[in-house]
């Protein structure tokens, strides 16, 4: 292993992330690249802090290069999130993908990935979805158990980081990426846990602590360097204001609901969800209330959060109609957010157009232009929802952070 890659949100950066970067070095990585969720998060919300703060936290903890995982993929389910991250790190020239998992067994994770890519699995899943399965996750586990009973593969898919790990493996196999996998044992609190553990805390728990109190209460769970960055960002009003985010997203959704066609163009729609969203938005007065109305056993909260964000940003599905933002299925470029100067020569061998200027990358071809426009839309929403709101267009002019 010479050039390791990590796919992460760093929202906010915490001790678990620092441990992962340190382990990459200890296990022999000479360079480490991070594909960082940019503009949005997988939970369907804005990052707590803007990219420059999050990028500096990653670099000061040991990353060499930080690339943007564009907003449409950052705010996506595990499969699309993983496929985009693998695409970026493989294109950057990484030889190893490092990630956390509750079951850090490479052979078992790859076995599960191969099964989920097989025709026999697709046939079994179809049967389960047509039967009594409560939702997709339950149908997938039942399908796997029916094909490999007693092997533990179905149980493997019952944990959030294992699920993402299997999606990373699937993406590597599908893309033929020259990436070895190096799963590390998940440290501390589970992904998405709302309360912190004794040593490590999830990003969700840290966001909750920040919202209820201040950055100071994060001190036991984040590196000292990151805490200094967060104090400064908070003093400048750069953290996201949840109330502003709620009002901004709801206002966009209400405006969209009144247009011809309503939500029919948003990506990820199925089973009449556009009608469900239209009805819910008529009475919802907060984002939390809107998610409450939309969430059911069949429609998980995370999916509904992402649906609302996609609709607010006009992210359209394949063959999207006019008035919706179209973008390619995989990132078409490597957008450098920050790095160490001595690592920059690695970009000469990149398999995708690479650079630090989003404006220049947008001019490479039509796919790059579409991707950049979708990224800029998320950045504009994020700038509006800071405690000290910022102007539009920052994504086009943001310089890279070079150490």
Image: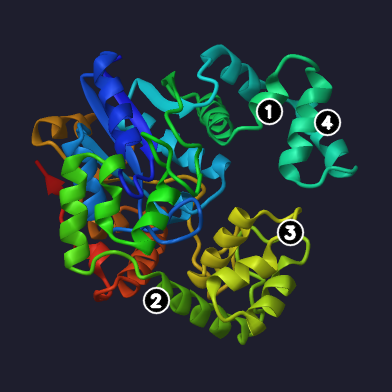
Image x and y of residue 91, in percent: 35, 33
Residue 6 visible in the picture = yes
Residue 183 vertical position relative to residue 268 in the rendered view, above or below = above
Nearest the eye: 369 or 116: 116
Mark 3–mark 1 CB contact (< 8 Å):
no
Among the two numbered marks 3 and 4 on one chain, the one whose residue lies closer to the N terminus: 4
Badge 3 element: loop
**Local SS, label 1:** helix
Alpha carbon separation for disc pair 2 and 3: 26 Å
Q: CA distance from mark 3 to mark 4?
A: 24 Å
- Per the model, the C-alpha gap separating discs 3 and 1 is 25 Å
User: For the residues marked 4 and 1, what is the alpha-carbon distance in whole angstroms?
Assistant: 10 Å
Looking at marks 2 and 3 on the same chain, the residue that comes earlier in the sequence is marked by 2
Q: Which residue is mark 3?
A: 296
- Residue ID for mark 4: 124
Nearest to N terminus: mark 2 or mark 4:
4
In space, the residues marked 2 and 1 are separated at their CA atoms by 41 Å
Nearer to us of marks 3 and 4 is: 3
Q: Residues within 10 Å of mark 3 (few under 14, many from 20)?
A: few
Query: Percent position (x, y) of residue 344?
Result: 15, 35
The CA span between labels 2 and 4 is: 45 Å
Q: Earlier in the sequence, mark 3 or mark 1?
A: 1
Which residue ends up furthest to the bottom in the rendered image? 258
Label 1: how many Cα within 10 Å (few below 14, some 14–19, many 20+): some
The reply to whether the C-beta atoms of the residues labelled 2 and 4 are less than 8 Å apart is no
The answer to which quarter of the image holds residue 270 is bottom right
Instruction: Specify few, some or many for label 4: CA neighbours under 10 Å numbering under 14, 14-19, or 20 or more.
Output: some
């Amino acid at each position: 292993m010479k050039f390791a890659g990590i796919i992460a949100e760093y929202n906010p950066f915490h001790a678990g992330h620092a441990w992962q970067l340190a382990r990459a070095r200890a296990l022999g990585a000479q360079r480490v690249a991070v594909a960082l969720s940019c503009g949005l998060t997988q939970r369907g919300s804005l990052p707590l802090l803007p990219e420059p703060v999050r990028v500096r936290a990653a670099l000061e903890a040991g990353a060499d290069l930080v690339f943007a995982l564009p907003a449409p993929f950052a705010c996506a389910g595990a499969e699309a999130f993983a496929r985009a991250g693998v695409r970026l790190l493989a294109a950057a020239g990484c030889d190893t993908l490092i990630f956390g998992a509750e079951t850090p067994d490479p052979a078992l994770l790859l076995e599960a990935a191969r099964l989920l890519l097989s025709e026999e699995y697709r046939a079994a899943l179809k049967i389960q979805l047509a039967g009594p399965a409560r939702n997709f996750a339950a149908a997938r586990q039942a399908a796997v158990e029916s094909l490999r009973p007693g092997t533990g593969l179905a149980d493997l898919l019952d944990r959030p980081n294992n699920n993402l790990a299997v999606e990373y493996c699937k993406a590597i196999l599908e893309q033929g990426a020259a990436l070895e996998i190096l799963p590390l044992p998940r440290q501390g609190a589970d992904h998405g846990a709302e309360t912190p553990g004794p040593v490590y805390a999830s990003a969700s728990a840290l966001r909750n602590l920040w919202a209820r109190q201040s950055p100071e209460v994060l001190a036991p769970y984040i590196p000292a360097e990151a805490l200094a960055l967060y104090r400064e960002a908070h003093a400048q009003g750069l953290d996201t204001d949840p109330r502003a985010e709620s009002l901004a997203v709801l206002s966009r959704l209400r405006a969209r609901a009144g247009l011809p066609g309503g939500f029919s163009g948003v990506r990820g729609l199925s089973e009449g969800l556009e009608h469900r969203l239209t009805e819910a938005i008529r009475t919802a007065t907060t984002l939390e209330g809107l998610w409450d109305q939309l969430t059911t056993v069949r429609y998980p909260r995370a999916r509904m959060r992402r649906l609302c964000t996609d609709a607010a940003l006009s992210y359209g599905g394949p063959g999207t109609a006019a008035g919706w933002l179209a973008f390619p299925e995989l990132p078409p470029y490597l957008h450098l957010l920050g790095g160490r100067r001595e690592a920059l020569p690695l970009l000469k061998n990149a398999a995708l157009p690479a650079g630090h200027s989003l404006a220049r990358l947008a001019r490479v071809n039509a796919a790059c232009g579409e991707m950049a426009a979708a990224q800029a839309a998320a950045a504009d929403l994020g700038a509006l929802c800071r405690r000290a709101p910022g102007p539009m267009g920052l994504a086009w002019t943001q310089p890279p952070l070079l150490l």
